[in-house]
Amino acid sequence: MEPEELTGAALLAACSALANPHRLRILGALADGRQYVSLLARQLGMSRPLLHMHLQKLQAAGLVTGSLELSEDGKAVKYFDAVPFALEITPQIVKSALPTLPDTATTAADPEKEASLCPPPTPECCSSSVSSS
Amino acid sequence: MEPEELTGAALLAACSALANPHRLRILGALADGRQYVSLLARQLGMSRPLLHMHLQKLQAAGLVTGSLELSEDGKAVKYFDAVPFALEITPQIVKSALPTLPDTATTAADPEKEASLCPPPTPECCSSSVSSS
DNA sequence: GTCGTATGTCAGAAAATTCTGACACATGTC
DNA sequence: GACATGTGTCAGAATTTTCTGACATACGAC
C-alpha cells in the first residue's frame, strides 16, 4: 500500500520544514506533549519572534497544529501540538511524487496554499475553542 | 523495530538534501537507474556546475553514490546511483534523534564529515573500478 | 494608572544557499 | 593541430533563509 498519495509539494514542504536544527528541536519538544509559545521559547533558548517563524513553517508543512486558547486567568495562550504524522521516503516514493511537484517558478499562485500531509486542516483561526472556567 | 539508530545529523542532512525541488527531481530520475552527470544535466535542463553541486549535497547526505568509470571510448564518465534508502520520520523518531544533533555552532570540526544513512561509504575516489573492455 | 504575562508583526541586518559564467583538465576523432 | 565529448572547480552575483530588535495588542493583578 502506498501512503495514499504524497504530493510533491507536500514532500518538499515537509523536508524543507525538517531541514533545520531548530525546527527538529521544536518538533521533538512537542512530541512530548503540547506547549505554548512563550514557554517553549524559554525551554529551547530562542527568541519568541524566531520561534514564531519556525512554528509557522512547521504548521504550513502540516507537521504541527496551533490552537489559541484561554487559560484560567483569562490570558490568551497559543498551544502547539505535533501532528502524529508518519513520513516515509524512498527514491521510488520521491519519483512518484515528482508529477505533483510545482514547476520551480509556477508557485506564485496561492500564497495561502498549505501543503499538508493531512487533508483538511480545520481553520480554527477565529474559532472559540475557549476553555474558560 | 526502530531503524537501527538514526543520527540527528543524518536526519538533518537527509532532510536538507531533500529540501529542494531540483534535488527531488535528480533523485527521482536516478530511481529509474544510474546515469552520468552530463546526460543527466541535459535531461533535467540544468547547467552542469549546478547539477554537480546538487549531486554533491545528495552524496554528502548518503542519498546517492557516484562512481567514476571509463566508457568504451576511454572517456571518463561519472555515474550516479540512488541509494536504496528508506527514511521514516515521525515526531517520536525526531525526538529520539535529538541527542545526536550537533550544537548549532559546534559543527565547525570536520568539513569532511559525511552524515550518511548507511555506515561506511566506501571511498572510491581514487579507485580504479574501471570497466575498460 | 503601572507591571507582568501572553499574543502577533514588522523592517532590516546577517548568513546561508542557489546559480551562472568562466576556467582548468583528459580523451578520442577528424 | 582543432573539435567534440567527458570531468571538476572557482569567484562572484543573485536569491532565499535566518535572526534580531523594535513595535503593537490584550488581559489580570497590584
Image (spheres, coloured by chain):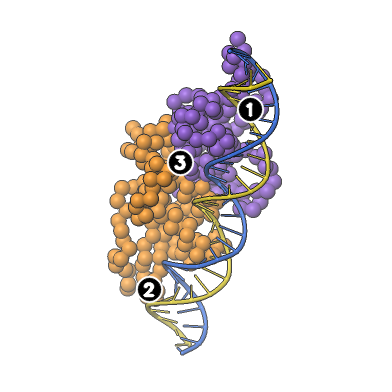
Chain colours: A orange, B purple, C blue, D yellow
Q: Secondary structure at mark 2?
A: loop
Residue located at (39% from left, 36% from top): A98
Please tell me which of labels 1 and 3 falls first in the chain.
Answer: 3
Q: Quadrant of residue A101?
A: top left
Provide the chain ID for the residue under circle 2: A
> Which residue in the protein does label 1 denote?
B122
Q: Quadrant of the C terminus of chain A?
A: bottom left
Q: Amino acid at mark 3?
A: Pro
Q: Quadrant of residue A65?
A: bottom left
Q: Amino acid at mark 2?
A: Glu
Q: Horizontal and vertical percent for residue B119?
A: 60, 32
Q: Secondary structure at mark 3?
A: helix
Q: Horizontal and vertical percent for residue A115?
A: 37, 48
Q: Nearer the viewer, residue B123 or C17?
A: C17
Provide the chain ID for the residue under circle 3: B
Q: Is residue D11 left or right of residue B80?
A: right
Count neighbours of disc 1 (C-alpha within 10 A) and say few if under 14, some if 14 to 19, many if 20 or more. few
Count neighbours of disc 2 (C-alpha within 10 A) and say few if under 14, some if 14 to 19, many if 20 or more. few
State whether residue A69 appears in this view.
Answer: yes
How far apart are labels 2 and 1 at the CA level?
A: 59 Å
> Which residue in the protein does label 3 denote?
B21
How far apart are labels 1 and 3 at the CA level?
A: 28 Å
